[in-house]
Image: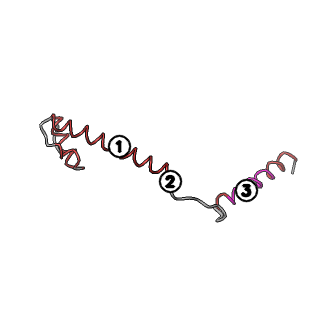
Amino acid sequence: MNLPVKRIALIATALLSSAHGVLAQSSDVQVSTSGGVGGAIGGLFGLLVAVIVIAGMWKVFTKAGQPGWASIVPIYNAYIICKIAGKPGW
């Protein structure tokens, strides 16, 4: 075996043996599953976005002469949006 091929084989062996520890996911690493403050802030942000989207859709539905509550019913709101746009509901 010539020297460059031997070096490549040695490097490949070293990489594969070090990757084995990563892929095996040894149990000496502790992972926290709690979200903490970041999870709470993310949850509040998601809730704020949802409230803004619902309020906007409610306003669109009422301006189009449809009941506002229809904007929060998942499949029915798609049907009403089609009716507002003048397209068939199916």
Q: Secondary structure at mark 1?
A: helix
Q: Which residue is mark 3?
A: 18
Q: Which stretch is magenta?
A: 10-21
Give the quadrant of residue 62. top left
Residue 29, percent from left and from top = 64, 61
N-term-proximal mark, 2 vs 1: 2
Question: Given the image, on which type of amino acid does mark 3 rest?
Answer: Ser
Crowd tier of the residue under label 3, counting other residues whose Cα lies within 10 Å: few below 14, some 14–19, many 20 or above? few
Horizontal placement of 58 versus 52: left or right? left
Picture disc at residue 36: 2
N-term-proximal mark, 2 vs 3: 3
Crowd tier of the residue under label 1, counting other residues whose Cα lies within 10 Å: few below 14, some 14–19, many 20 or above? few
Picture disc at residue 56: none
Taking depth in this image into account, of 52 and 26 the one nearest to the observer is 52
N-term-proximal mark, 3 vs 1: 3
Crowd tier of the residue under label 2, counting other residues whose Cα lies within 10 Å: few below 14, some 14–19, many 20 or above? few
Horizontal placement of 40 versus 75: left or right? right
Name the mark nearer the viewer: 3 or 1: 1
Q: Which residue is mark 1?
A: 48
Residue that extends furthest to the left in the rendered view of this protein: 65
Name the mark nearer the viewer: 2 or 3: 2
Taking depth in this image into account, of 72 and 8 the one nearest to the observer is 72
Question: Given the image, on which type of amino acid does mark 1 rest?
Answer: Leu
Give the quadrant of residue 28. bottom right
- Calculate the distance from the C-alpha at mark 2 to the C-alpha at mark 1: 19 Å
Could you tell me which residue is drawn at 18 percent across and 46 percent down? 70
Q: Is residue 38 above or below residue 52?
A: below
What main secondary structure does the magenta stretch of the protein show? Answer: helix
Give the quadrant of residue 50. top left
Whether residue 21 is visible, yes or no, is yes
Question: Are circles 2 and 1 on residues that touch, CB within 8 Å?
Answer: no
Horizontal placement of 67 versus 19: left or right? left
